[in-house]
Image (spheres, rainbow, N blue to C red):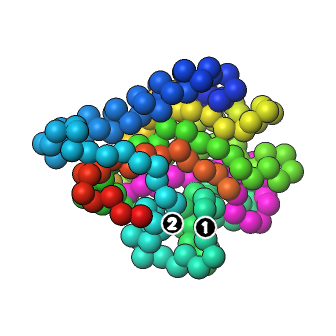
Amino acid sequence: MSYLIATEELSLSEQARLRQGAANQGIARASKLWQVAPNSLTVRDADYVNDFLVPAGVAVVAIAGWLSMPLAIVGNWYSVFASSVPAAVAPVVPTNQIWVFYKVAQLTLAGPDPVAGLQFRIGAAANLRAYFDMENINGKMVSDGYFSQPVTYENPDVCAVTVEARVAIAVGARVKLGCFIVEPLQNTVI
């Protein structure tokens, strides 16, 4: 069962436990999948442009951080990965990486909180992997939260992550996902 826990409802030690649990899950999966020792792997924060957009070969002019597709119609779902056109992007996990999503922060606070839901889908059929009710963090002092269980992707997974528009703001929302990239030590390049 997956659900969103508001950060302000967690102690610092609980936040650290959730982050470390996400990293450990990624390391364990990579170690098993690639048959390598855990100490030959590194875990780092994901970079929105260089990890998700550039490898997908999309236009990234003037993109410096997380920005979804424009939220045009209330109730519709929009990709959190968008090029500068804007066009939706569904990145594919490289062969030497595991992606572990563990947290979300709603950075756009235009009008009433613009995002109602967050879903992680996989593959061309966009099968649902996880859903989180973003309204669990609306009305809090800090509008971010941790996932009760991390969401992982590995090659050749197509990572389709979308948000549901609660308010039509006609521009992209800044919805930042906490994500660890697990990869072999020698391949870390940003």
Res. 166 in view: yes
Residue span colored magenta: 158-173
Residue drawn 68% across the image and 56% down it: 174
Categorize mark 2 by other alpha carbons within 10 Å: few (<14), some (14-19), many (20+).
many
Which residue lies most toward the left here?
35
Q: Quadrant of residue 173?
A: bottom right
Vertical position of residue 40 compared to residue 91: above or below: above
In this figure, which residue is indicated by the disc labeled 1?
A: 64
Residue 105 picture location, percent across and down: 64, 44
Q: Amino acid at mark 1?
A: Ala
Tell me: 107 left or right of 120.
right
Quadrant, the C terminus: bottom left
N-terminal of the pair, mark 2 or mark 1, is 2
Vertical position of residue 107 compared to residue 38: above or below: below
Secondary structure, mark 2, is: helix
Q: Which circle marks residue 49 in the picture?
A: 2
